Image (tube, coloured by chain):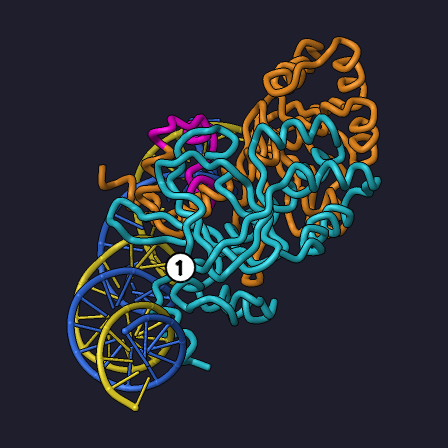
Chain colours: A orange, B cyan, C blue, D yellow
DNA sequence: CTGCACCCTTAACCTATGTTAAGAAAAAAA
DNA sequence: TTTTTTTCTTAACATAGGTTAAGGGTGCAG
């Protein structure tokens, strides 16, 4: 497997915190690389989430089944992003979610214990994650807001405007779920154009 | 003003990271205490958010006016919680939000520069905020999910079940907005009981 | 090449919630 | 107390989006 791919992680961390070569080494040593075929589950409900994953190639989604058995997508993430069930990962309680690859993918994964150690060895990593969660929280609030106060059509248009890669690479059913609407409604919205 | 109130902040930080006495001192020295009357704006749209606030007494909400002029509440926070417009605070770009006290309040505030310094002097503070944002992100995702896939009635019932202080202390109009519905709809839901 | 999943679309009908408007109740101010 | 302001309720009507059901397209597996 292409070794240079690992450095995508380092590249993105370096955007926010400046690492020394020996720190980069320690970080890379803490992650395990995993190749995963399309539609493979990295986590299932009832299991404890053992890893956060940095996607270096491909993509994944997290979803769950509600009481009525309907499937709802929580997150869709392509390469150069993180995905996990953070709640289960940090609390070490059973997850409610599936985590499944959307395409053939390569991920770097790290367990909570190794991450804690890494924070000690490379404190900048804790800074990196502070900034990461901070941004994720801000984004999540913005998404919450648009879900509460904008129409599905407006939300879809924003997604188009951002020229989001996701639109090209995942089925519309998934995008509808991610937008919080039924696939039929997304069809209706698309017809208007 | 009661000096012991400041230690509420230290008490809550100590739940997640163990501070030494000299660290507690440095932290307290970094925050400014501010007493604020009810319905006072701590931030207005167009201003750059200068502080994150830890509420030691009282409460506050953040809200904005959309293109149609309608008011939407983003967050409602009572004592022992943080409130700010993080996006504006960390980017130092103009905010889109109001930040306003719900009651007569006492807050501890810190500017981005002082916070950066504090991270250097007391690295545990960065760990504290990493954990804080991590939890905030997880909560925000859960709220996003319930907004997308549960009815307003279900969301309101959950709020009751959590026996949320907010229900007793802020007007229903605000609660409706926080739930993402019109005040009339909340009235309708309440009538059913 | 064929058949079977899977995905997307359409249309008719349904429902939760929004909107508008009015008035009642409660809280704050005078 | 009386007045004014704010908050809450109700009801009739409007609408975005959900639901159900059917059919068509596309691509992979055999």
Question: Residue at 82% of width from left, 28% of height from top?
Answer: A120
Question: Residue at 58% of width from left, 38% of height from top?
Answer: B110
Residue A190: image location, x then y, percent? 29, 39
- A42 above or below A30? below
Nearer-the-camera pick, D22 or B179: B179
Left or right? Give the position of B74 relative to A125.
left
Nearer-the-camera pick, B117 or A36: B117
Instruction: Tell me the chain of label 1.
Output: B
Nearer-the-camera pick, C5 or B26: B26
Residue A117: image location, x then y, percent? 83, 29
Left or right? Give the position of B27 relative to A192.
right
Q: Is residue A173 magenta?
A: yes
- D7 above or below A171? below
Stretch of the chain drawn in magenta: A160-178
Q: Is residue A57 magenta?
A: no
- A6 above or below A74? above
Total numbered badges shown on the rendered structure: 1
Q: Name the image quarter holding residue A86.
A: top right
Left or right? Give the position of B104 relative to C20.
right
Helix, strand or loop status at disc 1 = helix
Residue B89 visible within the image: yes
Secondary structure mainly formed by the magenta segment: helix
| Classed neighbour count for the residue bearing mark 1: other residues with Cα under 10 Å, few (<14), some (14–19), many (≥20) | many
Q: Name the image quarter holding residue D18.
A: bottom left
Residue C12: image location, x then y, percent? 23, 62
Residue A41 visible within the image: no
Question: Residue at 55% of width from left, 71% of height from top?
Answer: B160
Residue at the spot of label 1: B177
Location of the N terminus of chain B (image quadrant): bottom right
Residue A134: image location, x then y, percent? 58, 35
């Amino acid at each position: 497997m292409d070794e240079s791919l690992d450095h995508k992680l380092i590249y993105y961390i370096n955007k926010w915190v400046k690492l020394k070569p020996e720190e980069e080494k320690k970080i890379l040593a803490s992650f395990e690389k995993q190749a995963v075929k399309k539609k493979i589950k990295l986590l299932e409900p009832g299991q404890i989430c053992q890893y956060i994953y940095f996607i270096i190639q491909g993509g994944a989604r997290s979803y769950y089944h509600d009481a009525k058995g309907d499937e709802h997508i929580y997150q869709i993430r392509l390469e150069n992003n993180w995905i996990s069930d953070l709640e289960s990962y940090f609390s070490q309680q059973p997850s409610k979610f599936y985590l499944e690859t959307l395409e053939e993918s390569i991920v770097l994964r790290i367990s909570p214990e190794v991450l804690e150690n890494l924070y000690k060895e490379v404190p900048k990593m804790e800074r990196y994650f502070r900034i990461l969660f901070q941004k994720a929280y801000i984004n999540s609030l913005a998404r919450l807001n648009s879900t509460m106060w904008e129409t599905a059509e407006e939300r879809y248009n924003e997604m188009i405007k951002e020229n989001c890669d996701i639109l090209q690479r995942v089925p519309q059913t998934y995008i509808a779920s991610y937008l919080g609407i039924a696939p039929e409604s997304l069809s209706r919205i698309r017809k208007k154009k």
